[in-house]
Image (cartoon, rainbow, N blue to C red):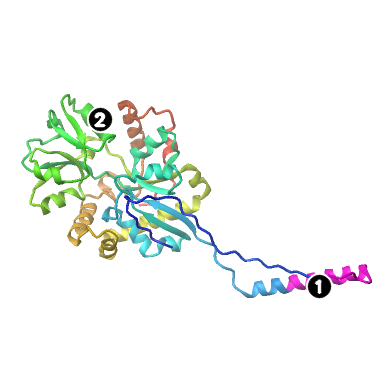
């Protein structure tokens, strides 16, 4: 089992994997026998003796374990605490114990999981349920196999003194958003924003730090920390509070799920176990993440892990009927109907084909 961490700036491709092969050959040079019938009889008994010998030797040695199934898992960003449960499961050997050879490859600004999984360059990827619905609408047979977060930590990052106190106050403002972000047109329509302006998100907090009027999309688990580190106090308006609340999910291709159903189930179960243990004590994983991503600091990792736990993003809020891995048909249907209403998808597919609830753990 290998953990492959590569920069998203480097080209990636499919890996060929070959194992050793062994062949047992019995060869015999035969002359012209004086008695063909007798020779044939002797040959039959000799062959039978050889097979018994081979089978006896074979049975003497213990049967080798089946080769673990290779699964290429592509995350949605560079190694970080938001992936902590997966790295925990890998480091603890839970995937290996389940008969899996998992390779974790990080994503990045130019390395998103959906196209890679769709093209067969990865087997399982990370994203939101919106990503999965949009993929199906474009002919990519993606299937969400588990919810890694009950609620999406995405939101809008504002300076603490910004006059915007609610989403309705965004009228007339410019917002830095990744092009194609599904929840932005939802905000515009729900709050009747006529003069809000969308500008490209640069994947940097630099412009925000320089401009007190700057508003940008963010993850509650990340950007507020860096802003505070630079001496800038912030507030976050969480997108989930608008009613638009997609799951963060792991997904695969439909054909991969059908062919490797039990392996996918084992991957999901090992991942959920990794997440529970990571949130209980993230220090084990953080020491490794620092090696994978030198830009991480202990303070940043502790901040992210605490936010994941405090806001119940992963394990869910029992008072709201949430639990780890839970996915409800009504929430998937809401996202489907909303994206269709916004014109983000045409919706000419069955929403039930985009996800499965068979791997949801019991609370």
Please provide percent x and percent y for residue 158. Answer: 12, 41
- Which residue occupies the foreground of this view, 19 or 242? 19
Residue 218 seen from this side: yes
Label 2 packing within 10 angstroms: few (<14), some (14-19), many (20+): some
Q: Earlier in the sequence, mark 2 or mark 1?
A: 1
- Which residue occupies the foreground of this view, 198 or 312? 198
Q: Main secondary structure of the magenta part?
A: helix
Q: How many marks?
A: 2
Residue 359 seen from this side: no
Q: Which residues are magenta?
A: 30-52
- Residue 270 is marked as none
Please provide percent x and percent y for residue 77. Answer: 30, 50
Please provide percent x and percent y for residue 136. Answer: 42, 35
User: Which type of secondary structure does the marked residue at label 1 adopt?
Assistant: helix
User: Badge 1 is on which residue?
Assistant: 46
Q: Quadrant of residue 105?
A: bottom left
Please provide percent x and percent y for residue 329. Answer: 38, 37
Q: Is residue 196 left or right of residue 73?
A: left
Q: Is residue 347 left or right of residue 290?
A: right
| Nearest to viewer (mark 2 / mark 1) | 1
User: Badge 2 is on which residue?
Assistant: 185
């Amino acid at each position: 089992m290998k953990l492959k961490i590569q920069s998203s700036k480097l080209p990636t491709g499919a890996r060929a994997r070959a194992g050793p092969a062994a062949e047992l050959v019995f060869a015999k040079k035969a002359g012209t026998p004086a008695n063909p019938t007798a020779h044939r009889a002797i040959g039959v008994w000799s062959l039978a003796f050889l097979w018994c010998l081979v089978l006896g030797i074979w049975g003497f040695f213990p049967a080798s374990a089946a080769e673990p199934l290779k699964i290429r898992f592509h995350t949605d960003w560079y190694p970080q605490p938001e992936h902590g449960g997966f790295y925990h499961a890998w480091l603890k050997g839970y995937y290996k114990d389940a008969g899996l050879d998992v390779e974790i490859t990080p994503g990045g600004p130019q390395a998103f999981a959906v196209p890679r999984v769709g093209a067969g360059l990865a087997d399982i990827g990370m994203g939101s349920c919106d990503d999965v619905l949009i993929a199906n609408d474009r002919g990519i047979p993606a299937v969400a196999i588990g919810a890694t977060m009950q609620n999406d930590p995405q939101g809008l990052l504002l300076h603490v003194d910004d006059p915007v106190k609610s989403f309705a106050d965004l009228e007339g403002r410019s917002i830095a958003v990744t092009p194609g972000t599904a929840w932005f047109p939802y905000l515009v329509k729900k709050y009747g924003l006529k003069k809000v302006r969308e500008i490209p998100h640069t994947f940097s907090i630099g412009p925000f730090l320089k401009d007190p009027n700057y508003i940008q999309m963010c993850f509650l688990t990340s950007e507020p920390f860096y802003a505070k580190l630079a001496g800038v106090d912030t507030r976050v308006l969480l997108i989930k509070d608008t009613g638009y609340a997609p799951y963060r999910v792991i997904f695969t291709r439909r054909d991969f799920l059908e062919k490797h159903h039990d392996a996918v189930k084992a991957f999901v179960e090992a991942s959920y176990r990794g997440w529970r243990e990571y949130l209980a004590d993230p220090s084990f994983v953080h020491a490794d993440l620092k090696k994978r991503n030198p830009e991480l600091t202990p303070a940043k990792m502790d901040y992210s892990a605490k936010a994941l736990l405090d806001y119940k993003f992963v394990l869910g809020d029992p008072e709201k009927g949430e639990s780890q891995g839970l996915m409800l048909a009504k929430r998937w249907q809401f996202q489907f109907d909303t994206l269709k209403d916004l014109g983000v998808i045409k919706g000419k597919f069955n929403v039930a084909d985009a996800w499965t609830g068979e791997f949801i753990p019991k609370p």
